[in-house]
Image (cartoon, rainbow, N blue to C red):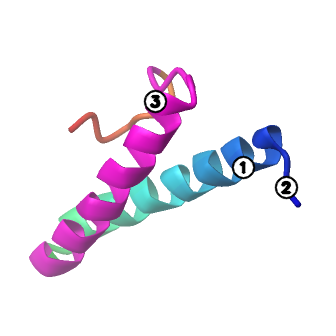
Amino acid sequence: MPNDLEIAQKAIEDFAKVQKNMILAKKENAVETYANLKEEYIALKALLMVAGVNLTELDKIKE
């Protein structure tokens, strides 16, 4: 069973992947893909904020 640190690490990695894909989707003008990724972005951002992770440096999208 993963501990809190492992869960936070996985969420941070997922957050970074989602942001990278959002940036690519925006460049490619993939509106639907961007919208779907944004939902995941918001959920991960909320989870990380509740976990007390400082997103100042991690959040590239800032929405």
Quote the CA–CA distance across marks 2 and 1. Answer: 6 Å
Q: Earlier in the sequence, mark 3 or mark 2?
A: 2
- Give the residue type that dot 1 points to: Ile
Q: Earlier in the sequence, mark 2 or mark 1?
A: 2
Alpha-carbon neighbours of circle 1 within 10 Å: few (<14), some, or many (≥20)? some
Residue at horizontal 30 percent and vertical 41 percent from the top: 61
Specify start and end residues of the magenta stretch as a single range: 31-56
Q: Which residue is mark 1?
A: 7
Residue at horizontal 56 percent and vertical 23 percent from the top: 52
Q: What secondary structure is found at the residue carrying circle 1?
A: helix
Residue at horizontal 72 percent and vertical 45 percent from the top: 9
- Give the residue type that dot 3 points to: Met
Quadrant showing the N terminus: bottom right
> With respect to residue 12, does 48 lie above or below?
above
Displayed quadrant of residue 53: top right
Report the predominant secondary structure element of the magenta stretch.
helix
Alpha-carbon neighbours of circle 3 within 10 Å: few (<14), some, or many (≥20)? few
Q: Which residue is mark 2?
A: 2
Tag of residue 53: none
User: Mark 2–mark 1 contact, CB under 8 Å?
Assistant: yes
Tag of residue 49: 3
